[in-house]
Image: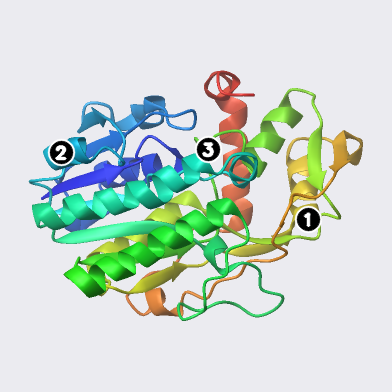
Amino acid sequence: MRILVTGAAGFIGSAYVRELLAGAYPAWQGAQVTVLDLLTYAGNLANLNPVQGQFTFVHGDIGDAGLLDRVVPGHDVVVNFAAESHVDRSIAEAADFVRTNVLGVQRLFDACLKAGVKRVVHVSTDEVYGSIASGSWDETAPLAPNSPYAAAKAAGDLLARAYHVTHGLPVVITRCGNNYGPYQYPEKVIPLFVTRLLTGGTVPLYGDGANVRDWIHVTDHCRGIQVAAEHGEAGEVYHIAGTRELTNVDLTDRLLTACGAGWDRVEKVPDRLGHDRRYSLTDAKLRKLGYAPRVPFEQGLADTVRWYAEHAAWWQERQQ
């Protein structure tokens, strides 16, 4: 089996490749893996050092149709992680998000059609739904994105559905909540807070801090993706829910405690434009296929903080 993983030098994509090549997914044991990544600011081949030499690397953009026509043929499965993903950056400048998350996705799907790829997995986000005051979204919830990032991801999801309905592309879509774990670029909240606290800095808390996010360890997310890849039905969406809902205040308190810091290290900042109040998914559909998370939040967060403390050289090169 040959598997192409796009965006595989980023946080979640690299975790998936490390898990795959370490034998975490027995059904795909021995697969030949190709990594395609543009190596933008958040992508780094150092994220794949633990499995270096076990994959073929191609430096390139999913928006490059000519490159895709050369790379995609011969692969049985394509797993697409390639995306611009930081909400604040999308608010400041949306063009790159549309270019990669919409046009790049369309060109990737075209290449998969032409090459006769047997399975395409398109990795998406709960942010495509907007905000939910109570309860949890299932996979039939309407899309109502509130940031340019979320809108671009929603557009990619709709293209996936359209390519399945129109052309029979064998694609499944996964949507997940907030990820945490090692190798996450320090612009995201957990590594941003941990790295600043470890170096004596302050951390920003948006607005009243009451926004709620559902947190999942990146390895559980990757396991859910794999279950959908192996057992999901083409054309369907599968949620991968988190293991702990927390307000940003609660998360900040846990990170302060883990880093031995006090609330004097927190700076209140104006709220983000269009800041969604709460996300929440139900993943009963995926659990029927055999998925269940394995990393308790308390353990996962402690392990993550420890990893950043022990790998200062990795993140100090990437701090902004």
Residue 184, numbered label: 3
Task: Say if residue 24 shows up in the picture.
Answer: no
Q: Residue furthest right?
A: 264
Q: Where is mark 1, residue-wise?
A: 250
Taking the spot 53% from the left edge, 64% from the top edge, the residue there is 128
Quadrant that contains the C terminus: top right
- Quadrant in the picture for residue 118: bottom left
Q: Is mark 3 on a helix, strand or loop?
A: loop
Taking the spot 84% from the left edge, 52% from the top edge, the residue there is 207
Within 10 Å of the Cα at label 3, are there few (<14), some (14-19), or many (20+) other Cα atoms?
many
Nearest the camera: 205 or 16?
205
Q: Is mark 2 on a helix, strand or loop?
A: helix
Which x, y percent locates residue 143? 52, 71
Tags 3 and 2 touching, CB below 8 Å: no
Classify residue 205 as left or right of residue 86: right
Which x, y percent locates residue 205? 81, 45
Kind of residue indicated by mark 2: Val
Kind of residue indicated by mark 1: Asp
Tags 1 and 2 touching, CB below 8 Å: no
Up/down of 139 relative to 88, above or below: below
